[in-house]
Amino acid sequence: MKIFLIGFMGCGKTYWGQKLSRKLQLPFFDLDAQIEEKEEKSITAIFNEEGEEYFRLLEKEVLYLLTESHESFVMAAGGGTPCFYNNIAYMKKSGTVIWLNCSVDCMYSRLLNEREKRPLLKDASEQDLRSYIKKKFSDRKIYYEQANAIINNDNPEIDALVSQIFHS
Ligand code: S3P
């Protein structure tokens, strides 16, 4: 069983992914953390030193490597993972894709003090952040919507999450 959690930055992919993996007793992979380990650099350093295009190629490579080399897992994708190189189709072909569809207000409050860890947000002022999230989120929805199941809850209960996955 391969479960991919997707959604915009701040929707809780890593948080719920870890919970889900414990509940289902499956290994957990955080795609960003795996990329950092492979490159021995932070995501911010990769963006700064190599640029976004390089990061997106690396993201795809690590997504494929992990997916091909493991039978079962829960994976927290990066916010942009499903939006590049048809990764969404690859994830759906390989397993079940769950979109954590969190409200803009909730993502805004979670991201406000987390900007420096995210290269796409680091230059956004407090005032600009909400409109940046709104715009980018609406551009990306077309990819997120292709998930097999959609969780419309900012703070889903783990049991509800599990039952939605198994009924998708
Ligand atoms: C990105 C989201 C980040 C990380 C990178 C780019 C994006 O992951 O992959 O900074 O394009 O939305 P999180 O969604 O885990 O913050």
Image: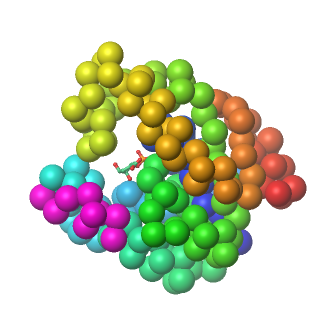
Query: Please, is residue 154 above or below residue 159 in the view?
Result: above
* Residue situated in front as seen by the camera: 50 or 15: 50
The residue range painted magenta reads 49-57
Answer with left or right where residue 45 lies relative to residue 3: left
Q: Which residue is drawn at 49% across and 62% down?
A: 29
Which image quadrant for residue 118?
Answer: top left
**Residue positioned most to the right:** 167
* Residue situated in front as seen by the camera: 112 or 160: 112
Which image quadrant for residue 41?
Answer: bottom left
Q: Quadrant of the C terminus?
A: bottom right
Q: Which residue is drawn at 25% across and 67% down?
A: 54
Query: Please, is residue 22 above or below residue 91 in the view?
Result: above
Query: Please, is residue 88 above or below residue 67 in the view?
Result: above
Query: x and y percent of residue 11 in the render?
Result: 54, 38
* Residue 54 highlighted magenta (yes or no): yes
Q: Residue at x 46, y 49 (%)?
A: 79
Query: x and y percent of residue 147 in the render?
Result: 68, 56
